[in-house]
Image (cartoon, rainbow, N blue to C red):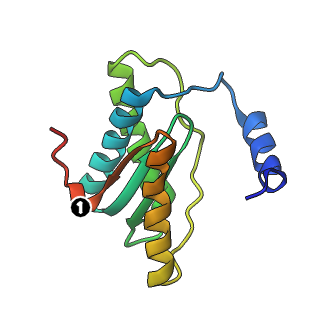
């Protein structure tokens, strides 16, 4: 979207920040992404695709109830604990997430491709096709 469309959201994010921003390096992106996927799967969520770049993430998943923010919050908390074990101090995530429902199959395919295309900009990406064997 045009930068003008995103500016209000960006300014609101800046106002809400209590700490300096954290930028994840490629290893931290992988660790955080895997932590999010693992917790969501543990919670019984069908995770389809995830991307994690230096400053944000995308998740395509099927939530069977209306507790999306709560479940994503637990996944982010899990990733934060894992990152802390690797020496990344401080708060990594903004509060809440912005869940958007999938309208139909075409929309789902479009979002799936959108999420995985973040790999071209340096994001860590994962899809259900890869399984949970991080090896």
Residue 104 in percent (x, y) is at 49, 84
Q: Is residue 67 visible?
A: no
Q: Which of the 4 image quarters holds residue 33?
A: top left
User: In this figure, which residue is indicated by the disc labeled 1?
Assistant: 129
Which residue: 41% across, 30% down?
26
Q: Is residue 110 above or below residue 60?
A: below
Direction from residue 32 to residue 17 in the image, left or right? right
Residue 115, given in percent of the width and then of the height, sits at: 47, 57
Please indicate whether residue 40 sits to the left or right of residue 115 in the image: left
Instruction: Locate residue 18, reporting x and y percent.
Output: 68, 26
Q: Secondary structure at mark 1?
A: helix
Tag count: 1
Where in the figure is residue 73, as x and y percent of width and height? 46, 47
* Quarter of the picture holding the C terminus: top left
Q: Which residue is at a point 73% across and 59% down the rendered structure image?
A: 1
* Residue nearer the viewer, 89 or 110: 110
**Rendered residue at 52%/43% (across/down):** 121
Residue 83 showing in the rendered view: yes
Say if 51 sits above or below 114 in the image: above
Residue drawn 44% across the image and 83% down it: 105
> Label 1 neighbourhood size at 10 Å, few (<14), some (14-19), many (20+)?
few
């Amino acid at each position: 979207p045009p930068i003008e469309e995103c500016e209000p959201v960006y300014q609101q994010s800046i106002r809400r920040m209590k700490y300096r921003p954290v930028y994840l390096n490629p290893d931290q992106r992988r660790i955080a992404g895997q932590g999010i996927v693992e917790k969501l799967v543990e919670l019984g969520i069908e995770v389809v695709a995830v991307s994690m770049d230096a400053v944000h993430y995308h998740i395509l998943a099927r939530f069977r109830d209306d507790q999306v923010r709560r479940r994503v919050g637990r996944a982010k908390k899990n990733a934060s604990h894992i990152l802390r074990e690797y020496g990344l101090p401080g708060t990594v995530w903004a509060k809440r997430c912005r869940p958007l429902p999938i309208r139909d199959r075409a929309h789902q395919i479009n979002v799936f491709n959108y999420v995985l295309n973040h790999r071209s900009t340096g994001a860590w990406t994962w899809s259900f096709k890869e399984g949970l064997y991080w090896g």
